[in-house]
């Protein structure tokens, strides 16, 4: 890594903060005189204790002179710091930050290791504790690389490493800003609360910018099997992410304070930041239900498969369409033979017909025959090609008698996948930019199809990552959520499992069954409590038929919408405001001649 990043990642000795100087001058913090760079706890790191913790630290002998026992003069065991020990200490935090990111990655599907997430954030908190804002940014950036490089490696499938490295680096820079914010609020009383809110603020930023945002990798999306999952029904993904972050930061603080002051009330209060999110999750369990409020429906999802994986699946468009039509006809034969119950409706995947049936009569006939064979409404994923203007990624409601009756245009269009921002600039780095020859355009309204009396809401693939896209569909009357997707581009990577975990979170968040038809897998049927009742294997033609509950009640998360996120953003803003106020007071005190703490 470059020397500038190394310095930013926390290699400079900690300096006195303005807030600490003010507390020292005013005699606050229960009479303690605090000094950055002092190791009164014996841990060899700056304590950064907030007022009221009861910490007593010794001041250095002179301004800018480290107190005895600090890392500048001695190791954690009190031995003189050799050049080797100093070198190891210099790189310890950056290395641990990368390891913390990798640990967070390991908590995500397909691994059922959700419980690693709080420990990853506890390790990140240890890296950031007592650091200045610049160091917080560097450490946060390194954490982001350790997390997102392995998490997003699937974006390199078929196009090489450039898009993957560019996306992971950009997102890691935004996580670096989050680390900066956590370092700023890390000296406040009850800092895990402020830091967890800052984490949610960072996720909110990544979900909105740049290019419309990229919410992939929210903490919430790794918790489909986790203890905290019921909180999704209470406050959506922001509250779920907040709980995981608070537990992780609180875990570090509880261990740190308990080590320094095992009999102090402060240790018990720090432990509360771990117990509170766990208790809240247990209390929210009654919100999770899969009862059939509006009866049940028998739903089917079709996975027709593709001839081969990768971007070239578009060159096999007719074969993909034929595969899905053939598997639907086979389902009709299975129904006729009594091997499976007859479905009330069927959902095909996104891009199951990349041939526009409104302009290509042969595609129209193939679809119409398949729908007539099954004899129930079918939602078809297609690409519409108007004479002018952008393409449309469209779901078509196809009736066995009336033909196509309704459409839904995908609203969240994937940048650098379905549309190409800065085309000329991006072409400098990759010729694959021209695979997207004509941009897709976004739809404007949520799509809820009336399918045999059931309100089936369409949330197409990438849209499942966005809170507002899913919520608006449920608010528009969806009793069931369908997430038709096309993951053939990404081969057998972990992408499909990461997306399936998102769909499980959405099921609990809005208390709806979720149907996931995918061109090449993994397709699934998910109940409103987040459990998967059926799923397919990758690159296998299949059909899933299941009876699902229909629900119309709204969870608090559905009703509140973005309000929990706004509250958490306000808490983060309050923390930054408090930090700013402390620095202003410190500067005024220094200007009035108040002695500064060493």
Image (cartoon, rainbow, N blue to C red):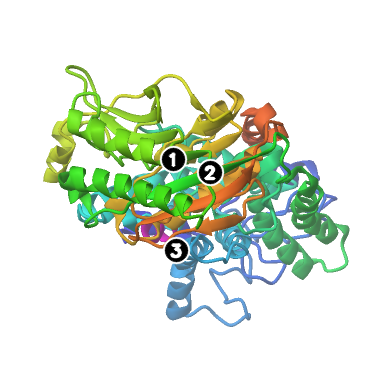
Tell which circle, 2 or 1, labels the residue nearer the N-terminal end.
Answer: 2
Q: Do the CB atoms of the residues marked 2 and 1 lie less than 8 Å apart?
A: yes
Q: Secondary structure at mark 3?
A: helix
State the residue position of label 3: 98
Q: Is residue 429 left or right of residue 132?
A: left
Q: Secondary structure at mark 2?
A: strand
State the residue position of label 1: 347
Counting from the top left corner in percent of width and height, residue 141 is at: 42, 52
Taking the magenta stretch, the answer to whether it contains residue 304 is no
Taking the magenta stretch, the answer to whether it contains residue 150 is yes
Tell which circle, 1 or 3, labels the residue nearer the N-terminal end.
Answer: 3
Front: mark 1 or 3: 1
Viewer-nearest residue: 462 or 116: 462
Q: Is residue 70 above or below residue 137?
A: below
Look at 77% across and 49% down and name the residue there.
285
User: Counting other residues with Cα less than 10 Å from the Cα at mark 1, is it few (<14), some (14-19), or many (20 or more)?
Assistant: many
State the residue position of label 2: 299
Counting from the top left corner in percent of width and height, residue 459 is at: 47, 35
Task: Name the outermost residue toward the top.
Answer: 388
Counting from the top left corner in percent of width and height, residue 456 is at: 53, 32
Tell which circle, 2 or 3, labels the residue nearer the N-terminal end.
Answer: 3
Viewer-nearest residue: 330 or 288: 330
Q: Is residue 72 left or right of residue 588?
A: left
Q: Secondary structure at mark 1?
A: strand
Q: Is residue 479 above or below residue 505?
A: above
């Amino acid at each position: 890594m470059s020397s500038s990043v190394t310095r930013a990642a926390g290699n400079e000795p900690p300096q006195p903060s303005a807030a600490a100087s003010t507390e020292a001058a005013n005699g606050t913090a229960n009479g303690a005189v605090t000094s950055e760079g002092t190791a009164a706890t014996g841990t060899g790191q700056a304590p950064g204790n907030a007022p009221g913790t009861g910490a007593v630290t010794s001041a250095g002998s002179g301004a800018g002179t480290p107190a005895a026992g600090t890392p500048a003069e001695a190791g954690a065991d009190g031995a003189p710091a050799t050049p080797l020990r100093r070198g190891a200490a210099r790189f310890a935090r950056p290395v641990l930050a990368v390891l913390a990111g990798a640990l967070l990655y390991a908590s995500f599907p397909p691994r059922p290791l959700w419980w690693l997430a709080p420990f990853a954030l506890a390790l990140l908190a240890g890296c950031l504790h007592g650091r200045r804002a610049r160091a917080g940014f560097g450490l946060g950036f390194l954490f982001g690389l350790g997390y997102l490089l392995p998490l997003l490696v699937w974006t390199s499938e078929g196009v090489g490493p450039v898009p993957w490295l560019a996306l992971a680096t950009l997102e890691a820079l935004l996580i670096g800003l989050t680390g900066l914010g956590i370092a700023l609020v890390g000296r406040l009383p009850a800092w895990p609360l402020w830091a967890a809110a800052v984490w949610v603020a960072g996720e909110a930023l990544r979900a909105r910018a740049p290019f419309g945002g990229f919410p992939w990798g929210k903490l919430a999306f790794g918790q489909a099997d986790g203890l905290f999952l019921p909180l999704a029904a209470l406050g959506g993904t922001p509250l779920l992410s907040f709980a995981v972050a608070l537990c992780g930061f609180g875990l570090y603080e509880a261990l740190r304070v308990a080590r320094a002051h095992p009999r102090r009330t402060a240790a018990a209060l720090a432990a509360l930041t771990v117990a509170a999110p766990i208790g809240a999750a247990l209390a929210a369990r009654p919100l999770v239900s899969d009862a059939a409020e509006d009866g049940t429906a028998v739903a089917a999802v079709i996975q027709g498969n593709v001839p081969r994986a990768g971007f070239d699946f578009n060159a096999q468009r007719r074969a993909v369409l034929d595969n899905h039509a053939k598997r639907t006809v086979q389902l009709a034969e299975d129904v006729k033979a009594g091997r499976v119950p007859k479905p009330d409706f069927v959902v095909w995947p996104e891009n199951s017909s990349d041939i526009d049936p409104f302009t290509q009569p042969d595609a129209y006939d193939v679809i119409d025959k398949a729908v007539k064979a099954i004899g129930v409404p079918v939602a078809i994923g297609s690409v519409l090609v108007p004479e002018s203007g952008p393409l449309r990624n469209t779901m078509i409601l196809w009736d066995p008698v009336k033909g196509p009756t309704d459409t839904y245009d995908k609203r969240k269009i994937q940048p650098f996948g379905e549309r190409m921002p800065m085309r000329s600039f991006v072409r400098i780095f990759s010729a694959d930019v021209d695979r997207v020859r004509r941009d897709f355009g976004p739809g404007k309204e949520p799509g809820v199809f009336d399918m045999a009396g059931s309100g089936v809401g369409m949330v197409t693939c990438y849209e499942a990552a966005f809170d507002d896209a899913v919520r608006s569909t449920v608010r528009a009357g969806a009793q069931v959520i369908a997430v038709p997707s096309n993951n053939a581009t990404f081969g057998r990577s972990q992408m499909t499992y990461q997306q399936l975990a998102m769909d499980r979170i959405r099921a609990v968040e809005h208390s709806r069954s979720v149907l996931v038809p995918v061109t090449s897998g993994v397709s699934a049927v998910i109940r409103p409590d987040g459990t998967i009742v059926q799923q397919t294997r990758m690159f296998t033609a299949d059909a899933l038929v299941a009876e699902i509950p229909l629900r119309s009640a709204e969870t608090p998360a559905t009703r509140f919408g973005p309000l929990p996120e706004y509250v958490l953003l306000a808490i983060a803003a309050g923390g930054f405001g408090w930090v700013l106020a402390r620095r202003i007071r410190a500067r005024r005190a220094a200007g009035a001649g108040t002695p500064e703490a060493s």
